[in-house]
Amino acid sequence: MEELITLCEAASRLGVHISTLRSWVREGRLPAYRLGARFTRVSWGALLRALDATAVERESRESAPREGEAQVYEDQR
């Protein structure tokens, strides 16, 4: 079974603000487990997978040409 940690602990381990993780949970990017009305836990493994998906998404967005930007192609000779 994967390690379940609090959002506060996850934020501390990653060096991000807890509101970032709360928004990921709200957006469905990070699965979370509710324990009663006040306690939320996330799987450390699921969190790492969500980070990998975010990194891939960011890389594809950054490598795509922006509107009005010329695209440079290397000569394939």
Image (cartoon, helix red, strand yellow):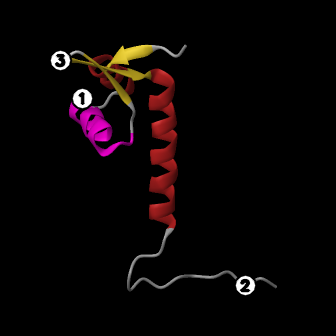
Q: Residue at x 33, y 27 (%)?
A: 15
**Amino acid type for the residue under numbered disc 3:** Arg
Closest to the camera, between mark 1 and mark 3, is 3
Q: Is residue 27 left or right of residue 62?
A: left
**Amino acid type for the residue under numbered disc 2:** Asp
Q: Residues within 10 Å of mark 1 (few under 14, many from 20)?
A: some
**Quadrant where the C terminus is found in the figure:** bottom right
| Residue on which the image places disc 3 | 38
| Residue on which the image places disc 2 | 75
Q: Position of residue 49 (x, y in %)?
A: 51, 35
Q: Is residue 5 above or below residue 61?
A: above
Q: Which mark is residue 18?
A: 1
Q: Position of residue 67 (x, y in %)?
A: 38, 81
Quadrant in the picture for residue 73: bottom right
Q: In front: 48, or 41? A: 41
Q: Which residues are magenta?
A: 17-29
CA–CA distance between discs 2 and 1?
47 Å
CB-based contact (under 8 Å), mark 2 and mark 3: no
Q: Is residue 35 magenta?
A: no
CA–CA distance between discs 1 and 3?
15 Å
Q: Is residue 27 above or below residue 72?
A: above
Q: Is residue 24 above or below residue 58?
A: above
**Amino acid type for the residue under numbered disc 1:** Ile
